[in-house]
Image: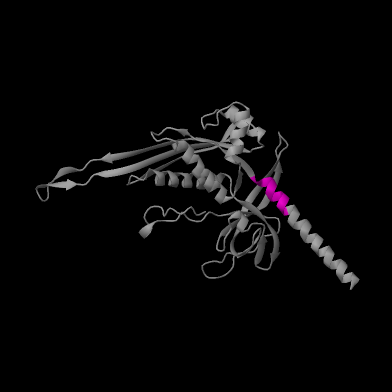
């Protein structure tokens, strides 16, 4: 009985060590981002601030990175007697971001307008008569963003997103532009975890509901195929390759269980996935509106 008790304790210790190591690895790979209020290029008050708040909310929901509280950013900027605006230069972003231990600062500008085309008559040659065409209203929003690497002050990523909706609801257009922008940021900073255990065709992954993982999500698995040493810098370069896809079938707070994706004929794909392989969540499709037209307004990732 004593021997069994010792073995039980040993197994618990092994699992604690395994999960602790994985947790530390996940924390080490999580990027820390600060979002500044964007420069307002629109005629609407607080438009840039609203854009930054919408993007911050989506980034927090996405959970592929850690987002610093706006109050903390403002505090540091105030202490350094700097204005926390999106149009600061890259050198200043690097200096202030380093104080907070950030990896990136998100800077940008927000532009928006509502345009109206009046109704008018046109001559219909086929029916040989004047016909009335109703006027149109458009909401136009453009977000221009860039992620600055605070370690070197260089722009690591930049993009521009434009949305046009045929109504006067510019706030919805802004919300959609922010949502689309965050989906683009995700391609640069995806949610990543690791395979921690394999049992037959099922795999245990260190991602769960705390990481916005849900049943039915698809996970892309990447493994190291080749490693080489750079002849000049001496840096170790690891080439990764896609070795399969997993479908989440069960989710807990900090982990999930996934199975191998099957082919159209129902057979499983070739199994080459091993514990330690990196896993990246694939974004869910952008939800469409009624009859598949436009965006549904749901912030789903």
The residue located at (61%, 58%) in the rendering is 209
The answer to whether residue 133 is left or right of residue 180 is left
Check the picture and name the quadrant holding the N terminus: bottom right
Q: Which of 12 and 45 is in front in this view?
A: 45
Q: Where is residue 6 in the image (x, y as percent from the top left)?
A: 87, 66
Q: Which of 185 and 106 is in front in this view?
A: 106
Image: 118 above or below 207: above
Q: Position of residue 66 (x, y in %)?
A: 62, 45
Image: 11 above or below 104: below
The mark tally for this picture is 0
Q: Residue furthest bottom?
A: 1
Q: Main secondary structure of the magenta part?
A: helix
Would residue 50 be seen by someone viewing this image from the given angle?
yes
The residue located at (28%, 40%) in the rendering is 116
What colour scheme governs how the chains and residues are painted in the rendered image of this protein?
one colour
Q: Which residue lies furthest to the top in this view?
A: 81
Would residue 226 be seen by someone viewing this image from the given angle?
no
Image: 188 above or below 284: above
Q: Nearer the viewer, residue 153 or 300?
A: 300
Quarter residue 204 falls in: bottom right
Q: Check residue 255 for magenta coloring.
A: no
Q: Give the range drawn in magenta.
A: 22-30
Q: Where is residue 231 in the image (x, y as percent from the top left)?
A: 71, 36
The answer to whether residue 45 is left or right of residue 212 is left
């Amino acid at each position: 009985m004593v021997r069994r008790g010792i073995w039980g304790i040993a197994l618990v210790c092994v699992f604690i060590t395994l999960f602790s190591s994985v947790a530390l690895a996940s924390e080490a790979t999580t990027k820390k981002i600060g979002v500044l209020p964007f420069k307002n290029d629109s005629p609407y008050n607080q438009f840039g601030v609203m854009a930054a708040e919408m993007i911050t909310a989506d980034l927090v929901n996405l959970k592929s990175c850690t987002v610093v509280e706006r109050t903390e950013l403002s505090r540091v900027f105030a202490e350094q007697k700097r204005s926390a605006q999106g149009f600061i230069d890259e050198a200043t972003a690097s200096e202030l971001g380093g104080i907070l231990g950030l990896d990136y600062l998100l800077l940008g500008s927000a532009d928006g307008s509502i345009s109206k085309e009046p109704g008018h008559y046109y001559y219909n040659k086929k029916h040989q008569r004047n016909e009335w065409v109703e006027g149109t209203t458009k909401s136009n929003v453009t977000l221009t963003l860039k992620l600055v690497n605070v370690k070197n002050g260089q722009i690591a990523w930049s993009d521009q997103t434009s949305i046009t909706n045929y109504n006067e609801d510019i706030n919805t257009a802004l919300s959609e532009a922010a949502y689309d922008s965050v989906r683009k940021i995700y391609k640069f900073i995806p949610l990543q975890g690791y395979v921690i255990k394999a049992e037959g065709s099922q795999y245990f992954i260190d991602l769960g509901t705390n990481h916005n993982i849900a049943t039915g999500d698809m996970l892309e698995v990447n493994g190291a195929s080749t490693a080489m040493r750079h002849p000049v810098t001496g840096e170790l370069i690891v080439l990764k390759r896609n070795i399969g896809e997993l479908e989440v079938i069960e989710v807990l707070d900090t982990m999930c269980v996934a199975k191998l994706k099957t082919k159209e004929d129902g057979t499983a794909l070739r199994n080459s996935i091993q514990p330690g392989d990196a896993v990246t969540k694939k974004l869910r499709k952008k939800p469409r509106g009624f009859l598949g037209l436009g965006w549904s307004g749901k912030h789903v990732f």
